[in-house]
Image (cartoon, rainbow, N blue to C red):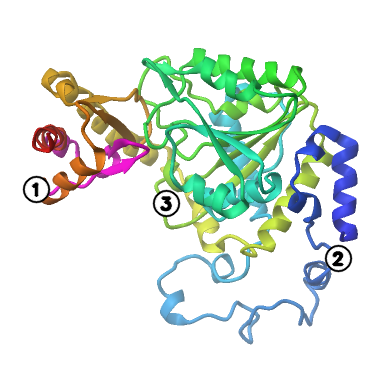
Amino acid sequence: MNPLAVDLNDVISQASPAIFSLLSKRGKQIYFPKKGILAQAAEAKGKAINATIGEAVEDDATPMRLESIASKVSLNPKQVFPYAPSFGLPTLREKWKTLIAEKNPSLAGKEYSLPVVTSALTHGLSMVGYLFLDEGDTLLIPDISWDNYSLIFSNGYGAKLTPFPLFKGDGLDLEGFRQALLAGEPAKKVVLFNFPNNPTGYSLTTIEATQIQKIILEAAEKGHTIVAIIDDAYFGLVYENGIETESLFARLADVHSHVLAVKLDGPTKEDYVWGLRVGFMTYGVRLGTKALYTALEAKTAGAIRGNISNASHLGQSLLLQAYESSTYGAEKKAKYETLFARYQAVKKTIAIHPEYTEQFEPLPFNSGYFMCVTLKNGLDCEKVRQILLNEFDTGLINLSGVLRIAFSSVSAAVIPTIFENIYKACLKAQ
């Protein structure tokens, strides 16, 4: 094992043996190469002659670039073309931590790590798998979930995906989740939360969030060590009163010293920049020290360097510009109102057409980009989807045995037609 990995392992195990036990074999072996090329390049920074870094520069020492590309970007070339650090731009990391605190007031007074920049949230999830999942490890996920989890965790790292029931009636199946988490003798448990949920568009009520916190605490007190992965891709898009507006990270970041909360988030959905590919990975644990978090950040950055080297410098710079803009808040509010109007159109359409419930039933939804319907009368989702495509010029997603409607991607005016088409396709499919 590399001595740098040994040093990081020593820091983590001394600060928290429980957290060290959660690391995968890869997680224990990974390190950030602070004594190699990067360290030597850092030592040469600012010298009159610097021939260390693998970047080309012009004779005036600015980044070498093609005018056909540079002319399309108004930012300073130094904010666009050089490599970004594997940890991410320091100013953006600090800014995102500030934004997390603003969006989650109950984090006040709690210690958690500085976010590490990933190549958007999917890459962050992969880095969680790298650091915390060995082949054969079990990952608890909702039984209705994003299909990419299988590619990331099962195909990518050999984890066994074990579903727990998402719904019971009109809300979360809390007892089903509790039984899944507490099953077996005390052991390492890795669980994934995704609220607002993809595909259902469901977010926790404040009461449900409190209950999940209690269940996690109960499991830890019974001897389980837990990695709580919190996929906050659609964070902030809540449309009803009584729904939890803060991330589960705020509740789990200090719930117990044997529970490591890992928050995966970013601007992709929150700030409507799907193509910039910038995300963040943040750690929280009760009694977590600066040394512990610094070591976890270094392992994360090491995994990133060995995987993609670093995330887009251009994407990070553009986001910093946006977050410093005086119009950012108003712009974001306007986009939220557009999505909220589409959500309301869905609710209204379902409410004024009771006949639809003869053919399909909406699953609980209150947030995010999506909602889902389950079909009745033994109808097959794929058959109905094909009828919608071929006879009604309408595309939906068949996912986990339900039909997902992305109301985020259509105008409010089109939404009544979507549900009318689903109803007619169901009739045809019988």
Residue interval drawn in magenta? 393-417
Residue tagged 1: 391
Instruction: Please report whichever mark, 2 or 1, sits nearer to the chain's N-terminal start.
Output: 2
Query: Residue 35 — which label?
Result: 2
Taking the image as shown, residue 384 lies to the left or right of residue 187, namely: left
Pointers 2 and 3 in contact (C-beta within 8 Å):
no
Is residue 193 visible in the rendered image? The answer is no
Question: 287 left or right of 340?
Answer: right
Q: Residue at x 29, y 44 (%)?
A: 397
**What amino acid type should be assigned to the residue bearing mark 3?**
Val
Judging by the rendered image, the residue that carries numbered circle 3 is 273
Pick whichever, 430 or 233, lies toward us: 430
Looking at the picture, which amino acid does disc 2 mark? Lys
Amino acid type, mark 1: Glu
Q: Earlier in the sequence, mark 1 or mark 3?
A: 3
Q: CA distance from mark 1 to mark 3?
A: 33 Å
Q: Can residue 154 be seen from the camera position used here?
A: yes
